[in-house]
Amino acid sequence: MSTRSSNLKLPDMSKLSTSGADFIDEQRFELLMRQKSDVGRIDEIIAKSKSKEPLSVEETALLLSSDSPDVVERIFDTARQLKRDIYGNRIVLFAPLYVGNYCMNDCAYCGFRRSNRESIRRTLTVDELHQQIVSLLQMGHKRTIAVFGEHVTYGPEFIADCVKEIYSVRHGLDSIRRVNINAAPLSHEGYRILKDVGIGTYQVFQETYHHSTYARMHPAGTRKSNFIWRLDSPARAIESGCDDVGLGALFGLADWRFEVLSLVAHANHLMRNYGVGPHTISFPRMRPASGVTLKEVVENDVADKDFLRLIAILRLSVPYTGLIVTAREPAEIRKTALGFGVSQIDAGGRIEIGGYENNNEKEKEKDIQIQALEREQFELGDVRKLDEVVVQLLNDGYVPSFCTACYRLGRTGKVFMEHAIPGFIQNMCTPNALTTLKEYLVDHASPEAQKAGNKVIQEELNKIEDGTKKTEIIKRLNRIENSKDRDLYF
Ligand code: SAM
Ligand code: SF4
């Protein structure tokens, strides 16, 4: 891979997007957070959200304004309904791939920050990257998110080389079909380089939208200290053709209500200026990390009940945006969150650099956890294997999906929204979920997953009306079962 890279000098602020302004109106958001609850208005907003209309910041603030158990329960019910209506019972699965943890920033909460002497620094070599992908393919993954620290050696050309390498790996019938990225904000030119190699989503979390908290967490003089450069990065990505962008906030830094309002403001800003909202929103909660004293950074711990509430409220506010909950969260929280609107989870993931070497049956789970603590960016809350997660999802009535069809058929950005809004998603996504689940069952699953999976596929088929579509789905499922034909997407 090339080590050619763009020089990570401080950002050039003349290169912001055409919409590059600070739209986080802190004073207004704080006033909205202090407003009195109005049950009549809340009822109207809940009714509006049932018609799948995105909500404004003001409307979201009203949903946040009431702690009444009755209102909270109605929001959960509406979130469950929207989840079912828009996304069905599919859950998309992916795995993180940590490529390198060199970092020039000094984010107070992160184990990779430059002042953390405990961190063992590493960048995967081409061979190691190849081997990591083979491990993911052996598990059954088709979709990964490649994660990078922010460093001179991780410029867009380097990231693009990694993406090409990942797509090129073949193992038996398997290959990675979608590579998403979580890395530092890039310039327009950087995003264009990544667009050219066919990335999926480009994810940049703002961490916190609260200006003074942001300044405290990201020391002056580091590249990440520039709030606007980061806030503007999804807009630059869209302007450069990377129209699947992922937003996120790291919960625990500032008031969770403020972060929710800001995420909605960010989504609406993109929608207003580009006609396309974020493809995904993530809401990681702060986890213990090497060299980080959590007490010093977590000033606004988010209780489990508030965490679930914020997911439900986001489901109402941005109905067409995928919500991701990662393995930072323990299995029980993830299980509950799935019902309220989460549509994507990672499974069987390792977040150490080279962590998938440990995905070897001979290794003891204990060794995996000890090694993880030594080298990972933060600790995971859910360390179950992919197959265990698949079995749980199936037993809970979900369809685990390894689908990657949309972006490969150009259904991204605005086009994705056009498909998503009239409910087309279910017509294409359910068949693709069934065929990719079938691939998993035939090629990778344990007997337990096979039994549960084939039962769920039959149940889902029973729900589909007889007709050409159903006949075609059954035909493709049979081809997967009886031949080496794979990747038969709609
Ligand atoms: N370096 C890039 C950046 O900062 O955007 C991307 C990689 S960083 C490893 C990915 C994300 O991990 C960060 O955006 C942050 O939200 C999250 N993260 C960092 N420290 C964490 C912690 N202690 N607990 C949970 N998530 C954390
Ligand atoms: Fe570096 Fe990203 Fe960690 Fe900050 S969050 S220290 S930029 S890897």
Image (cartoon, rainbow, N blue to C red):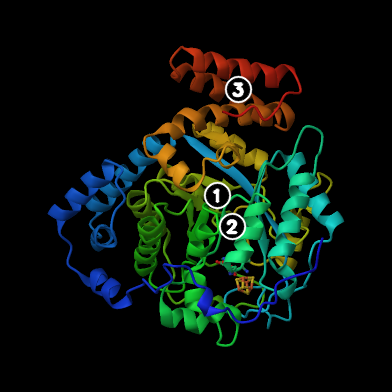
Which image quarter is the N terminus in? bottom right
- Residue type, label 2: Gly
Q: CA distance from mark 2 to mark 3?
A: 29 Å
**Other residues around mark 1 within 10 Å, as few (<14) / some (14–19) / many (≥20):** some
**Other residues around mark 2 within 10 Å, as few (<14) / some (14–19) / many (≥20):** some
Which of 13 and 316 lies nearest the eye of the viewer?
13
Q: Earlier in the sequence, mark 2 or mark 3?
A: 2
Return the x and y of residue 488 as percentages of the image width and height.
64, 27
Return the x and y of residue 88 as percentages of the image width and height.
43, 34
For disc 2, the marked residue is 381
Q: Earlier in the sequence, mark 2 or mark 1?
A: 1
Q: Do tag 2 and tag 1 residues touch (Cβ < 8 Å)?
A: yes
Establish if 232 lies above or below 193: below
- Residue type, label 3: Asn
Per the image, label 1 sits on a secondary structure element best described as helix
Does the beta carbon at disc 3 come under 8 Å from ligand 1? no
Q: Which mark is residue 454?
A: 3
Establish if 161 lies above or below 136: below
The residue that appears at 25% across and 60% down in the rendered structure is: 67
Q: CA distance from mark 3 to mark 1?
A: 24 Å
| Relative horizontal placement of residue 320, taking residue 5 as reference (left or right) | left
The quarter holding residue 400 reads top right
Per the image, label 2 sits on a secondary structure element best described as loop
| Relative horizontal placement of residue 344, taking residue 102 as reference (left or right) | left
Is residue 448 visible to the viewer in this orientation of the structure? no
Q: Which mark is residue 331?
A: 1
- Residue type, label 1: Ala
The quarter holding residue 171 reads top right
Is residue 226 visible to the viewer in this orientation of the structure? yes
Per the image, label 3 sits on a secondary structure element best described as helix
Return the x and y of residue 434 as percentages of the image width and height.
57, 27
